[in-house]
Amino acid sequence: MNSLTKRGSHAALTIIFLLFGFMLAIQFRVRPSIDANVYHQRAEELSLLLEMTEQERDKLREEVQVLRDRVAEFMAGQSDIKALQEELVKARILAGLVEVKGPGVVVEMNDAQDSVGAGQDPNLFIIHDTDILAVVNELCAGGAEAISINGQRIVARTEIRCVGPVITVNGTRIAPPIKIQAIGDPNVLEPALKMRGGVVDNLKLWGIEVKIRVEEELILPAYSGSVSFKFAKPVEKEE
């Protein structure tokens, strides 16, 4: 190989090495720039994702609060409904429309068993509607919460009256022995009936038999008559 050829080879190698070095230099300068762009893009994506997550969290918080408010309203409504149901039960008991049970007293009455003397009015020695009314009134005054007479529940519309030789209660005929049941405090009801000069003493003066006993639990039937109203209407209050 002559000197000219050697010089050409050296020159070619030199150019190749220069190009190679130049390419390496460019690569080292571009790589950091690419890494920086990727990092910056990734940071923007993460920032956007975080913002979306926070918005979703705030939305869920609002929905949770709405649900809590609804639950509170529902519970308040349930409380109102429960109170109304309790008031309805009280009203039905007061009206005698439901069967009830509780402690109280039983009063058993029967006509006089002794023979009527000459010249005496026999009607004075048998039970009349006024006698039953006197006992019922005394029980009511003693705080009786429910009363029945021979299985007939006493309500606001109940009538106790004589119709000829028989007594009717709620339109039903009853006859002695008369059994009056009253739910209430026995410690008050019994003394109210047995007070000196009271209703029981007056009945015994005419030979009417009256027996009183205390019961731990009585069961009184519901009123079975009509509860429809043709004329009475509630008064509407002006707002």
Image: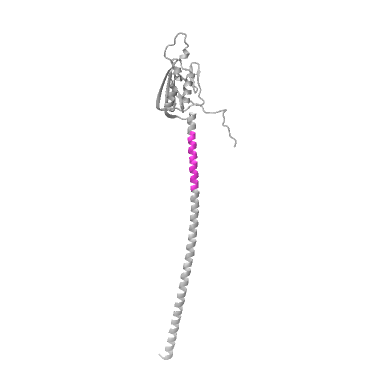
Q: Quadrant of residue 12?
A: bottom left
Q: Which residue is pictured at 49% across the width and 30% down the height?
A: 94
Residue 132 screen position, x and y as percent: 47, 20
Q: Which residue is pictured at 49% across the width and 52% down the height?
A: 61
Task: Say above or below: 180 vs 20.
Answer: above
Q: Which image quarter holds the N terminus? A: bottom left
- Farthest residue toward the front? 196
Residue 91 screen position, x and y as percent: 49, 32
- Farthest residue toward the top? 118
Is 81 magenta? The answer is yes
Q: Is residue 114 left or right of residue 232?
A: left
Q: Is residue 92 visible?
A: yes
Q: Main secondary structure of the magenta part?
A: helix
Residue 235 screen position, x and y as percent: 58, 32
Q: How many marks?
A: 0
Nearest to the observer: residue 163 or residue 5: 163
Nearest to the observer: residue 77 or residue 37: 77
Residue 204 screen position, x and y as percent: 43, 17
Q: Which residues are magenta?
A: 68-88
- Farthest residue toward the right? 238
